[in-house]
Image: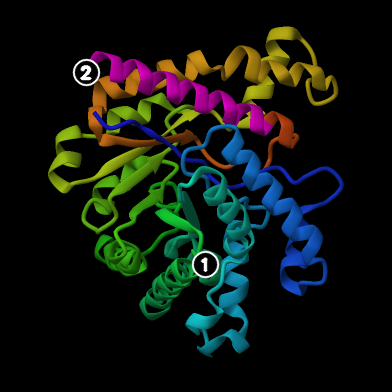
Amino acid sequence: MQDVTFIDGGSLPVPEGVTRDWFKAAAESRAEDEKLFSLVREAFQRKIDVGIHVPTYPQYRDMIGQFLDIIKDEKNCYEPYVLKEENAKILELEIIDEVAKRYKEETGETLEVRVCVAGPTDLYLQAFGTSMFRDAYHYMAMNIDRFVRKAFETAKNFKIRTIALDEPSLGMNDRIQFFDPDIVSALTLASTYARQQGADVEIHLHSPLKYKVVCETPINVIGVEYAATPSYLDLFDREYLETSGTYVRLGVSRTDIGNLIGAINEKYEVNAWKEKEYMQKIVTEMETPEVIKKRLETAFAVLGDRIRYASPDCGLAFWPDQELAFKLLENTAKGIDAFNAENRGTE
């Protein structure tokens, strides 16, 4: 079988001494590029160093706001909410190109990268709420396709392996008024260019309740948060995935930091938010490489080679600090690598 590829969700806790508001302001004003570029590049290099096979650009800005702010700015558009392609830029991709160039010079290989963008449904809900305007939903999908096109133009020294559409509302938010054919149409449009370029297109769903709708689109990878909710595995029909040519990205390490710390507090009768040394037990006792490998083994027994990617459940933006977040990423890498090595040995 093919090795399972380790990807990450993108977001991280901000480095010490800066805030998410600072990153937003710096990206928009471009007044502190030297500091901004340095912090993004350092985090991206660390993702490579801890063993992520296909890293996502470090995301320090709000996922939806990062894209919607550009779309809502009239000077970036032909008409309201119709984005000009030249303005559909993901700044972080320009920043990490220098790291990818160095990687190529040092290894002789081209770095593969995952690019995550907000999906059309979540963008629409943020912009318009529960009102149903099909034209506007179509525009959001079209805009996402333009961000994807621009991303491929930006990739001078790296290869985009995966485009991920972040759609946590699908299957979780009962405010969505669109019918399944509307959703299929929007996701098809948003993923068009990426598929033409031969990239995998992943959709990040918190819950797989809507996965059969996704299987009707060209999207070929469905990502779900399996580590925190193992029962999600029971919702998948392997034969249905095979028939539709769809694969799975499974979250195999937990990122629900509040619940993880709650378990530590209960076990040791402490407040780990204050006694921070206890937080280390998340990565030394709970989310260890052995636990992560076991989760992947359990899922493989059910889904087999439908599992193409594995990752933490979600991003790590709300973890207490970068050191703990990178330790989780390192443990995830070790668990996935051990699983792959063992499977290769049984072929």
Q: Nearer the viewer, residue 209 or 280?
A: 280
Q: Which of the 4 quarters of the picture holds residue 341? A: top left
Q: Main secondary structure of the magenta part?
A: helix
Disc 1 residue crowd, few under 14, some 14–19, many 20+, Cα 10 Å = few
Q: Is residue 221 visible?
A: yes
Q: Is residue 312 left or right of residue 4?
A: right
The residue that disc 1 covers is 129
Q: Is residue 24 above or below residue 105?
A: below
- Residue 5 position, x and y percent, is 39, 36
- Residue 132 position, x and y percent, is 41, 72
Going by the numbered disc 2, the residue's amino acid type is: Glu
Viewer-nearest of labels 2 and 1? 2
Q: Is residue 5 magenta?
A: no
Which coloring applies here?
rainbow
Q: Is residue 271 visible?
A: no
Q: State the quadrant of the N terminus.
A: top left
Q: State the quadrant of the C terminus.
A: top left
Q: Is residue 344 magenta?
A: yes
Q: Is residue 283 left or right of residue 22?
A: left
Count of numbered tags: 2
2 and 1 marks in contact (CB < 8 Å) = no
Q: Mark 2: which secondary structure?
A: loop
Q: Nearer the viewer, residue 70 or 333?
A: 333
Q: Which of the 4 quarters of the picture holds residue 239? A: top left
Q: In the rendering, which numbered label is found on residue 220?
A: none
Q: Nearer the viewer, residue 188 or 5?
A: 5
- Residue 224 position, x and y percent, is 40, 39
The residue that disc 2 covers is 347
Mark 2 or mark 1, which has the lower sequence index? 1
Q: Is residue 233 above or below residue 343?
A: below
Magenta span covers which residues? 325-347
